Amino acid sequence: MNAYNIYYFKYSINQEYFYSIYAVTILAQMFGASLYPKFNRLLSKMSIFYLSGFLSILGMLGLFTFGQTHADNIPLMFFAASVKQLGSGLFMVTVTHDLAFVIEVSKSESGKRYPAILTSAKLLLAKFTTALTGLGIGFGLHLAGYVGNHQQTPQTALLISLQAFGIPILLVMISMICYRKFSTLSSE
C-alpha cells in the first residue's frame, strides 16, 4: 500500500498534499512497535499478529472510504492512516520476533547458530518482494489506464484506489491465514 500512496493521493482523490501528511504517521508505526512488549505480556503472539492485521485492514478501509467520501477531511484521513500504521508497527515487530524465535529453534535443534544465514534470507526475500511490488505497481497502473501527469478518468481513479487497498488487504488476510498455519505447525 505504501508504494501506491502517491498515486492514490494525487490521482485518485486529488489530495497530493496528503502524501506529506501521511509521512508523519510513521510516528504511529513507531508507537505500534513500542506497544509490542506490553501486548506480549498480555496476549499471545498469534493474538498480537491478528490485532496488527486487523488494525492494518481497518486503517486501509478507512483511508479508502474517507478518500471516496471525505478526502479533504485531514483529521479523518490522518486518523485512518494512523490506525493503519499502528497495525503496521505491530506487524513488523511480530515478524522480527518470530525470526528471532526461528534462529533460537534452529540453534537448539542443530546445535549450531546460523543467524546471519536466516537474517540474510529474510533480507533477500524483502528485496525480492520490493522488486516484485514495483513490477506489480507498473502493471496495475497500466491495467487501470493510468496516464502520467494527467487528470485521470473516474474509472482509472477508482481502479487505482481499489488496487491501493484491495491488494494489500488481500495480502494481509493471506498472511493471517499463513501465520495461523505456521503457528499450528510450530506448536506440534
Image (cartoon, rainbow, N blue to C red):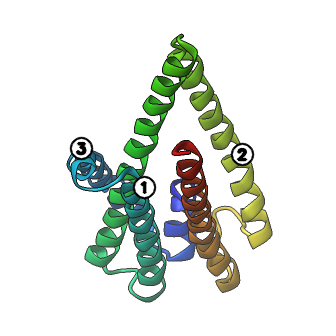
Q: Secondary structure at mark 1?
A: helix
Bin the neighbour count of mark 1 within 10 Å (Cα to Cα): few under 14, some 14-19, many 20 and up.
Answer: some
Residue 151 visible to the viewer:
no
Placement of the C terminus among the 4 image quadrants? top right
Residue type of the residue flagged with mark 2? Leu
- Observer-side mark, 3 or 1, equals 1
Res. 164 image quadrant? bottom right
Q: 182 or 137: nearer the eye?
A: 182
Q: 110 or 84: nearer the eye?
A: 110
Distance from Cα at disc 3 to Cα at disc 2: 32 Å
Residue type of the residue flagged with mark 3? Pro
**Mark with earlier residue (3, 1):** 3
Please provide percent x and percent y for residue 126.
60, 37
Bin the neighbour count of mark 3 within 10 Å (Cα to Cα): few under 14, some 14-19, many 20 and up.
Answer: few
Q: What residue is at 55 percent from the left and 43 percent from the top?
A: 186
**Mark with earlier residue (1, 2):** 1
Residue type of the residue flagged with mark 1? Met
Res. 173 image quadrant? bottom right
Q: Which mark is residue 37?
A: 3
Q: Which residue is mark 2?
A: 132
- The vertical placement of 151 against 33, above or below, is below
The answer to whether marks 3 and 1 mark residues whose Cβ atoms lie closer than 8 Å is no
Please provide percent x and percent y for residue 113.
51, 13
- Observer-side mark, 1 or 2, equals 1
Q: What residue is at 68 percent from the left and 62 percent from the top?
A: 148
Residue 100 visible to the viewer:
yes
**Mark with earlier residue (3, 2):** 3
Q: Which mark is residue 46?
A: 1
- Observer-side mark, 3 or 2, equals 3
Distance from Cα at disc 1 to Cα at disc 2: 27 Å
